[in-house]
Amino acid sequence: MRVSLLQIDVNGDEPVESRRSRVAALVAGRRGDDLVVLPELWTVGAFAFDRFEETAEDAADGPTARMMSEAAVEAGVWLHAGSVIERAPDGTLYNTSLVFSPDGRLAARYRKIHRFGFDKGEAVLLGAGSEPTTVTAGDAVLGLATCYDLRFPELFRKLADAGAQALVVPAGWPDKRAAHWTLLSRARAVENQAYVLACGTAGAHAGVPQAGRSAVIDPWGEVLAEAVDNREQVVSAELDFARLARVREEFPALKDRVLR
Ligand SMILES: NC(=O)CCC(=O)C(=O)O
């Protein structure tokens, strides 16, 4: 399975509508990939808390969902469209990831469970998701998580237990904690013997320089492809699920679990 992570430059100078069109064109041009992944909140910016309310949209039928659905069809790919600020029917806002099939169907949505900010930011502005989510995308079972979720291994273990072979983590991770991003991404791959597709944002927004450093990590913890900086770029790699099965068979640590 050929995957590409699009490490999108998110900055306040580019209007959200322009970025949406630009990203839709980038996705539409990815014919040949099987799965394309976008970062967390690439429309507004994960740290642009003061703009969450004005940019909130319907998860299934908002402007981002519509354009991403069309772009997935045009490219003929599975698309993890990163996340949007979802306005739910009761008015609650969520940080919600969207996955589209190659025929444009919204195949999965996942509301971020662990909200970032402690007593500020997401933690006070957004509702918390409660449903660990997997989705079958072509040959792969994807486990969905978002940015700060990466710090909570119990979520990833639940996803692995539910059959996830590739753990997809869109993020808007800041540069000052880049070492945590790269370390935890590899740890989640090794401990769950799964691929990790970690897709961060490029550039800087809301005064927060981003780590970038998007990476595809294999079930042995090897980095198959990575962005070495925080410029906008595409990171591509081939996922081999026979290799995943071999790793799990030859080093069956998951079977040795004692505590559940
Ligand atoms: N958008 C986020 O979830 C940021 C997470 C973060 O900065 C961290 O975990 O560190």
Image: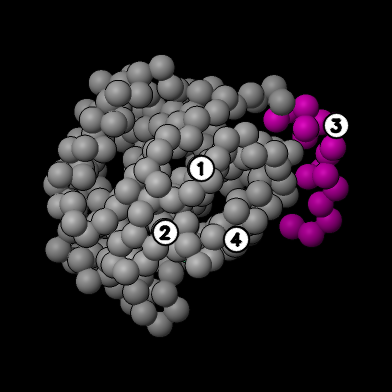
Q: Residue 254: say if magenta.
A: yes
Between 158 and 233, the one nearer to me in the picture: 233
Numbered mark located on residue 210 in the image: 2
Q: Do the residues labelled 4 and 1 touch (CB within 8 Å)?
A: no
What residue lies at 54% left-to-right and 33% top-to-bottom? 141
In the figure, residue 70 lies in which quadrant?
Answer: top left
How many other residues sit within 10 Å of disc 2, few (<14), some (14-19) or many (≥20)?
Answer: many
* Whole-number angstrom distance, CA of label 1 to CA of label 3: 30 Å
* Image mark for residue 250: 3
Residue 74 sits in quarter: top left
Residue beneath disc 4 = 179
Q: Which mark is residue 227?
A: 1
Q: Earlier in the sequence, mark 4 or mark 1?
A: 4
Tell me the magenta residue range: 244-260
Residue 40 visible in the shown view: no
Q: Residue at x 42, y 59 (%)?
A: 210
Sequence-wise first label, 4 or 3:
4
Q: What residue type is labelled 1?
A: Ala
Element under disc 1: loop
Name the residue type under label 2. Gln
Give the structural element (helix, strand or loop) at label 4.
Answer: helix
